[in-house]
């Protein structure tokens, strides 16, 4: 798999920002078929940091309704990436 397509976007939530501040852990939405090794390699390549550990979680798409129409959102995968001690923390750009 191409490293450019592994990391889809950072997840900027209260829980994600707390993990970033307290545990040096970043949250990303990643490609559902990406492995931990591929996520680690992609983060190290794009952000020039050393990664200590990667944890992943799979989420099933939830049912959503709009009137009589019923559909499902896509399945997705989240990766928690912990940086090594002494590495510079990545700063996200906030929407203004």
Image (tube, rainbow, N blue to C red):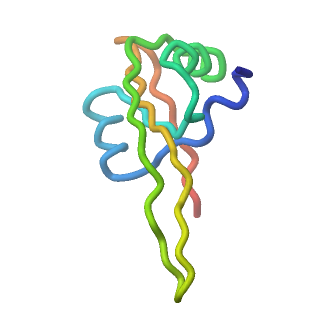
| Vertical position of residue 61 compared to residue 90: above or below | below
Q: Residue 52 location in percent, x, y?
A: 39, 11
Looking at the image, the residue that sits furthest to the left is 22
The answer to whether residue 33 is left or right of residue 61 is: right
Q: What residue do we see at 39% from left, 52% from top?
A: 13
Number of marks in the rendered image: 0
Q: What residue do we see at 43% from left, 36% from top?
A: 27
| Vertical position of residue 50 compared to residue 69: above or below | above
Q: Nearer the viewer, residue 87 or 58?
A: 58
Q: Nearer the viewer, residue 80 or 86?
A: 80
The answer to whether residue 34 is left or right of residue 57 is: right
Q: Residue 95 location in percent, x, y?
A: 58, 59
The answer to whether residue 96 is left or right of residue 89 is: right
Q: Residue 51 location in percent, x, y?
A: 45, 13
Which quarter of the rendering shows the N terminus?
A: top right
Q: What residue do we see at 30% from left, 47% from top?
A: 15
Corner quadrant of residue 59: top left
Q: Nearer the viewer, residue 85 or 32?
A: 32
Looking at the image, the residue that sits furthest to the bottom is 67
Q: What residue do we see at 55% from left, 69% from top?
A: 71
Which quarter of the rendering shows the C terminus?
A: bottom right
Q: Residue 25 location in percent, x, y?
A: 36, 29
């Amino acid at each position: 798999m191409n490293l450019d397509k592994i990391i889809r976007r950072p997840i900027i939530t209260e829980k994600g920002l707390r993990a970033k501040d307290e545990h040096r852990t970043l949250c990303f939405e990643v490609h559902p078929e990406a492995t931990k090794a591929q996520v680690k390699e992609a983060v190290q390549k794009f952000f020039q940091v050393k990664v200590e550990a990667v944890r992943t979680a799979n989420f099933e798409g939830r049912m959503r309704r709009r009137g009589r129409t019923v559909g499902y959102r896509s399945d997705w995968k989240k990766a928690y990436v912990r940086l090594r001690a002494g590495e510079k923390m990545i700063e996200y750009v906030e929407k203004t």
